[in-house]
């Protein structure tokens, strides 16, 4: 215990004396937390710029345009003379979509003749494309049935009868878990921890590799009385504490101040957060043991961090990935953490429900233990010192 405290105090002194630790352990996490807390605004997309190509120029076409302008999701930025101009602006991303009202729209609709209102949207960004598609469909659905309703009223049909044959099946939407369609509910918290994972990997790697780079590995081992386990635990302990405070503070911000819906227990999420931080540090230590060369392991860690963002299951369900990719996702702590937290968010899960994910995170802690002698030998012999 005396050696553990000595190594930890030594590391705290190193952290205070170097600006890079302050920036990477405090400034960047706080900045990313502020960014994730404010990026989604009120939680939904609004005022997406779109265009209109009105080839009819009648009262009926202007009524359709006014419906678009009244939508909070869409913002009619410009009226185009033809489709070619509108298409060029979509390709340049000046607008995300446009509506085409054909010539003779009012006459055909008034005579109950077939007429098409076409809309086009940029679907390279799936979230924006999905919002545009949904907004156009909701706004144009009443327009499509209005001519039939007008003719039916003229023939003396009752409004209730018209509704029954226009909409024979009543549609009722009941969204689960995220009734407000708030992007912040399912993106803010996991995206923050995806970024925190990258910082954890890089900070852990740098704190270990800087000893050999600076030629201070003997002082480090001497403070731990030659015990490699104590040397590693004492060095990483201050970072574990600091990042745990950041993680628990982030959870308090998301589920307290931002009032994101939480069906489960905040205490369980905080416990999983600390376990995730320990597992990520263990993964970084293991990678450094395998590749004790800073120039090489930085590339490996950068790749692992970026892949973790993809394989976490935030943007695409892990269970629907190809089998090799699904199997590879188990090698990333962020995947187990996100899955466990989502059970707490949506399913009112208990810690027992998160048992499998918690066990997987715990297994990461044992991963570097088997290669500690290899790391100690690399530090003593300075075998890889010329590559640092």
Image: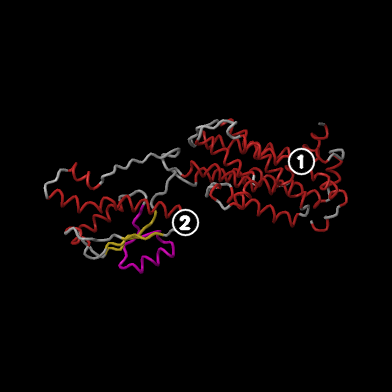
- Closest to the observer, 347 or 243: 347
Which structural element holds mark 1?
helix
- Closest to the observer, 10 or 309: 309
174 sits left or right of 320 in the view: left
Give the magenta range: 74-97
Instruction: Characterize the local packing of mark 2: few (<14), some (14-19) or many (20 or more) Cα atoms within 10 angstroms.
Output: few
- Closest to the observer, 139 or 200: 139
Residue 195, given in percent of the width and then of the height, sits at 60, 47
The disc at residue 235 is 1
Quarter of image, res 239: top right
Q: Nearer the viewer, mark 2 or mark 1?
A: 2
44 sits left or right of 270 in the view: left
**Residue 77 lies in the magenta stretch:** yes
- Closest to the observer, 37 or 269: 269
Return the residue found at the far front: 323
Which label's residue is closer to the chain start, 2 or 1?
2
**Residue 40 lies in the magenta stretch:** no
Residue under label 2? 125
Above or below — where is 77 with respect to 258?
A: below
Residue 232, given in percent of the width and then of the height, sits at 78, 41
Residue 264, given in percent of the width and then of the height, sits at 53, 31
| Quadrant showing the N terminus | top right
């Amino acid at each position: 215990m005396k050696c553990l405290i000595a190594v930890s105090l030594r590391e705290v002194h190193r952290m205070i004396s170097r600006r890079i630790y302050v920036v990477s352990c405090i400034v960047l996490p706080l900045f990313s937390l502020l960014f994730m807390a404010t990026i989604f605004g009120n939680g939904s997309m609004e005022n997406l710029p779109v265009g209109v190509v009105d080839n009819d120029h009648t009262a009926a076409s202007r009524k359709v345009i006014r419906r678009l302008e009244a939508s909070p999701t869409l913002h009619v930025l410009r009226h185009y003379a033809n489709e070619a101009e509108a298409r060029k602006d979509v390709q340049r991303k000046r607008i995300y979509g446009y509506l085409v009202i054909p010539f003779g729209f009012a006459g055909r609709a008034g005579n109950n003749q077939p007429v098409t209102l076409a809309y086009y949207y940029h679907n390279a960004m799936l979230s924006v494309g999905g919002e545009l598609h949904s907004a156009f469909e909701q706004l144009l659905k009443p327009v499509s049935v209005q001519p039939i309703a007008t003719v039916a009223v003229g023939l003396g049909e009752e409004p209730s009868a018209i509704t029954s044959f226009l909409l024979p099946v009543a549609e009722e939407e009941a969204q689960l878990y995220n009734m407000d369609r708030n992007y912040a509910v399912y993106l803010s918290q996991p995206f923050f921890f995806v970024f925190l994972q990258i910082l954890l990997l890089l900070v852990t790697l740098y704190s270990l590799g800087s000893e050999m780079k600076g030629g201070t590995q003997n002082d480090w081992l001497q403070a731990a009385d030659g015990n490699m386990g104590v040397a590693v635990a004492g060095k990483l302990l201050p970072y574990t504490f600091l990042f745990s405070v950041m993680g628990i503070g982030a959870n308090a911000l998301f589920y307290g101040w931002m009032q994101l819906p939480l069906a489960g227990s905040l205490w369980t999420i905080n416990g999983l957060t600390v376990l995730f931080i320990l597992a990520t540090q263990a993964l970084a230590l293991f990678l450094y043991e395998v590749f004790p060369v800073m120039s090489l392991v930085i590339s490996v860690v950068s790749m692992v961090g970026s892949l973790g963002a993809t394989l976490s299951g935030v943007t695409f369900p892990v269970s629907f990935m190809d089998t090799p990719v699904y199997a590879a996702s188990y090698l990333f702590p962020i995947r187990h953490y996100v899955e466990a937290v989502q059970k707490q968010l949506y399913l009112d899960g208990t810690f027992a429900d998160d048992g499998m994910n918690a066990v997987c995170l715990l297994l990461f802690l044992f991963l570097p233990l088997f290669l500690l002698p290899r790391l100690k030998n690399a530090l003593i012999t300075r075998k890889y010192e010329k590559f640092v």
